Image: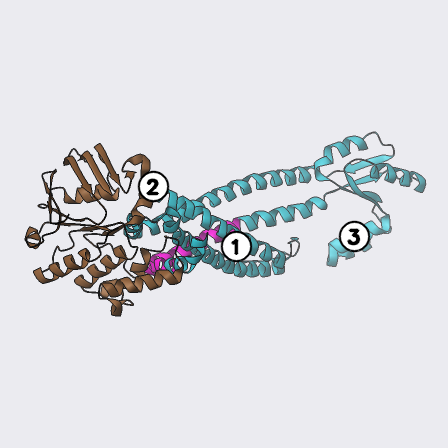
Amino acid sequence: MKNFFSNLGYFLKEAKTIFRIDFLSNIFSIFSIGLIFFILSMVISGWWLSKEVVEVLQKEAEINIYFEEGLDNIRVNNLLENIKSIKGVREANLVDKEESYKRMEEILEKEARILELFDENPFQPFIEVKIDISEVDGILEDLEPLENIDYIRDNKDIIDKLEKIITILTIVGILVITATGISTLVVISHIIRQGIYNNRDQINTLKLLGAPDSFIGFPFLLEGLFLTVVGGILAFGLIFFTFRLGYKQIGTSLLFIPLPSMEGLVKAMAIFILILSGALGIIGSFFGLSSAKGN
Amino acid sequence: MIEARDVSLVYGDGTEALKDVNLKIDKGDIVYITGHSGSGKTSLLKLFMGIEYPTKGQLKVLDLDIKKEEENNIRKMRRLIGPVFQEFKLIRGRTALENVMLGLRFLNLPHRKIKEESIIALEKVGLGHKRDSLVEHLSFGETQRVAIARAVVRKPAIILADEPTGNLDLDNALNIMELLTSFRDEDTAVIITTHATHLLEDIDEGKFIRVNQGQVTVESRGEA
């Protein structure tokens, strides 16, 4: 360990020299690694954003329960309490006739004038039930025996589609992330291996002088770490600009999509890329070194 | 220091490089290995360095059996040898001093000591003033001296020089021989291979190993 610290300056200088000798090739490597990280980060961000959006939509999943006309307040409240006690129901609220009318006015906006054609409020009061999407079947079963229910608008088709999207997104996300992660590792270890190959004469000389493998390999490990970390920083820069542009576009044209905050996403991605680039740099270098040693 | 008993070396392609070699090199010996190109001189040095393993017989270098199973120990054993390679094997892009320092880097010495010893070694070979020059900017003879400085800086038990006089005129060749033998002391053996036998005619002390078609004969002159 003492030997390691006394040679730290040498290792850094060697890593710098190795980088300088294959300067152009290393610059291209940084760009390649940066682009790979950028693609990987975009895939992960896209997957994460979709999950966030789906989660928000999941929280909004609801069914509407219409009760028999002329039901007195006591029975309506009893029905409401019964619904609240069902497993999977997160919230249940009574929406009276006036509230129904007001909501429709908000939905119709300028077209709301059409409502003025009615002499009386045409809407029915109903119970709005926010649910846990995975419990929808059980909730519908539990609602069946309850009295005084006239009609249930369960939005089952939409909810089922939403569940399918979540499953597909999860599977595709894991597959793409795994594939991109493995490609990143393979490319990085190949780049490191190439660097070792370019310096094979130096490595052979060191072996003949009796240098241990750790001494020979450490500058290459440092170089690998440097390439991946700089590549990671480059990828982060690209991601930052892409997010800024993307959020601006979505923010102005697709207002209804509930996106998580950009700052949070950028921060998470910065930490993710930094850790990933460091880890892949070390792992890739070890792979490169051990495969070069085998040859 | 080095003891070979019935050592043979046959390469993978069937070439028989060395046949039943028996020799002994002791501390403080000065050894000249001669023979024509392709006679087996370099093969003998490769065995001493543990780059090749005997295919028959037993070879001990610094009390270590040279065989595949000892690969890790052979790497450590090389730290006690100061090699001067035929093609020098200096590292381009580094200065003369950096190349010499490389010989000491992994020997658990403090950085200051490594630098001091390397400067002294460069001064001994007459290149103190060129220590900050990149090796690719040095002349052939200077490059060779840097290689010698890298070999001797670690105060090795054995200095192994493979054809150090090749491509040199007579005066320079004699100077290099003189320089190399000057590092011999009671603890350090110096082994030099050369195909230029005329350089050895006036030498009256040392062991002379003649390699001919893989077979070795040993002759001693003077105190050796």
Q: Which mark is residue B73?
A: 2
Q: Which mark is residue A103?
A: 3
Q: Position of residue A2 (x, y in %)?
A: 45, 54
| Amino acid identity at mark 1 | Leu
Label 1 secondary element? helix
Label 2 secondary element? helix
Question: Looking at the image, which is closer to me, A276 or B164?
Answer: B164
Question: Would residue A68 be seen by someone viewing this image from the given angle?
Answer: no
Q: Position of residue A178 (x, y in %)?
A: 50, 42
Task: State which quarter of the image contains the C terminus of chain A.
Answer: top left
Q: Which mark is residue A105?
A: none
Q: Is residue A37 shown above or below B113?
A: above
Q: Classify residue A222 as left or right of residue B47.
A: right
Magenta segment boundaries in residue numbering: A15-43
Q: Position of residue A58 (x, y in %)?
A: 69, 44
Q: Image quarter for residue B136?
A: bottom left
Q: Position of residue A234 (x, y in %)?
A: 47, 59
Chain drawn brown in the picture: B
Label 3 secondary element? helix
Q: Classify residue B84 as left or right of residue B168.
A: right
| Amino acid identity at mark 3 | Arg
The subunit carrying tag 2 is: B
Q: Image quarter for residue A137?
A: top right
